[in-house]
Image (spheres, rainbow, N blue to C red):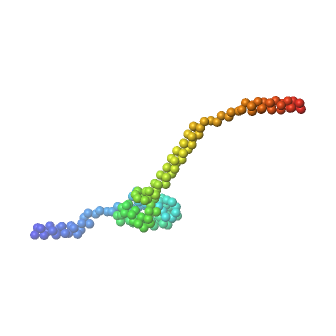
Amino acid sequence: MKSKFCLGLLIIAFIFQGSFFRVEAKQFDYKSAEFKAVASQFACTCGCGQDHYECDPNTCNLTTEFKADLVGMMNKGWDKDKIRKYYVNIYGEEILTSPEKSGFSLTAWVLPFVVLGAAALALFIIIRKWVKKKRTEEPVIEYQNTEDEVEGEILSSMIDEERKKYL
């Protein structure tokens, strides 16, 4: 009899456990830090170039609907990664403000900077070689022929004599 009574109490406690232990889910709003972390990872598709947290809801109807969906998902218990995967499956990686840190996305974001750095380094090396080559060349010394000097002096003396005659 005692075991039946304990079993009955256990069944009643199991049925009404929600009323004995109330655990309230955290409610999120547009100003919470968690919402900011989730909304700022998605780029607004209206063309403003901002993320959904920063986009002005007065001028963009897309962001008001998107924010309402995000708050609804967060209040249902979805975490940041699950929401991210959901929107990436719908819109693709174009909706993300920062690329995935793996695979082709990382290569596509890093490769232009690597190529630009390599080109700058190659240009630096080429210019340095040109400067060194210019320094190693011997300076050209102009040798004047003594005959040219004598002819120049004779010519200038003749010009001076003619000038003295007429002036």
* Percent coordinates x, y for residue 141 in the rendering: 65, 34
Q: On the rendered structure, is 123 left or right of 72?
A: right
Instruction: Work out which quarter of the rendered image holds the C terminus and state it.
Output: top right
Q: Residue furthest right?
A: 166
In front: 163, or 102? 163
* Percent coordinates x, y for residue 136 in the rendering: 57, 37
* Percent coordinates x, y for residue 76 in the rendering: 35, 65
Instruction: Work out which quarter of the rendered image holds the N terminus and state it.
Output: bottom left
- Is residue 68 visible in the rendered structure shown here? no
In front: 63, or 81? 81
User: Vertically, is 1 above or below 53?
Assistant: below
Q: Residue furthest left?
A: 1
Q: Residue furthest front?
A: 147
Residue in view at x 44 percent, y 61 percent: 96
Residue in view at x 44 percent, y 65 percent: 92
Residue in view at x 71 percent, y 33 percent: 144
Q: On the rendered structure, is 19 left or right of 162?
A: left
How many numbered circles are shown? 0
Q: On the rendered structure, is 139 left or right of 38?
A: right
* Percent coordinates x, y for residue 88 in the rendering: 42, 64
Q: Dividing the picture into quarters, in which one does residue 24 lie?
A: bottom left
In front: 125, or 79? 125
- Is residue 50 visible in the rendered structure shown here? yes
Q: Dividing the picture into quarters, in which one does residue 25 lie?
A: bottom left
Residue in view at x 44 percent, y 62 percent: 93
In front: 158, or 14? 158
User: Vertically, is 51 above or below 3?
Assistant: above
